[in-house]
Amino acid sequence: MTLRMEIIRNKIKELKNSLEYLKSFLPSDPNYLNNRKDKNALYKEAEVAIQFVIDICSVINSDISKTTPSDEDSIIISLEKEKVISKNRCTTTP
């Protein structure tokens, strides 16, 4: 297995762990998130999970694209152009 594949596999493993944590952390009562400490912990873990996805996309993009994206949105656009991900997965919100 190449080093690049190992990096991707490790990022996917970390992403799965992060998502499992988020799933277990989500309260059944939305009022629970009125506690600022718990809300911040949940937001931070969501941010970490999103960053894992961006990291994975960045590694894949660097292997298949001839251009260097300037930001995260450009990575996603590049992967869509290379048909790695579908256009409906590339829609970003302002």
Image (cartoon, rainbow, N blue to C red):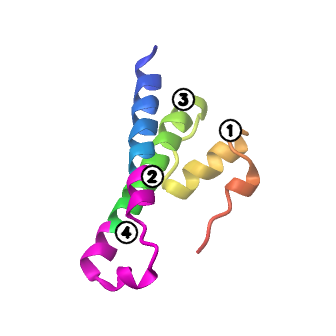
Question: Image point 52% across, 48% down: which residue?
Answer: 69
Secondary structure under badge 3? helix
Among the two numbered marks 4 and 3 on one chain, the one whose residue lies closer to the N terminus = 4
Q: Residue furthest left?
A: 37
Residue 62 on image: x %, y % = 51, 34
| Pick the front one: 87 or 28 | 28
Q: Quadrant of residue 23?
A: bottom left
Among the two numbered marks 3 and 1 on one chain, the one whose residue lies closer to the N terminus = 3
Q: Is residue 13 left or right of residue 82?
A: left
Amino acid type, label 1: Val
The circle drawn on residue 19 is: 2
Instruction: Tell me: residue 14, above or below residue 43.
Output: above
Residue carrying label 1? 84
Residue carrying label 3? 63
Q: Contact (CB < 8 A) between labels 3 and 2?
A: no
Instruction: Tell me: residue 55, above or below residue 41.
Output: above
Residue carrying label 4? 43
Question: Image point 68% across, 62% down: which residue?
Answer: 91
Residue 27 is inside the magenta segment = yes
State how far apart marks 1 and 4 are (Cα). 28 Å
Question: Image point 45% across, 81% down: which residue?
Answer: 30
**On the rendered image, what quadrant is the C terminus found in?**
bottom right
Instruction: Tell me: residue 8, above or below residue 72.
Output: above
Magenta segment: 19-41
Residue 36 on image: x %, y % = 28, 81
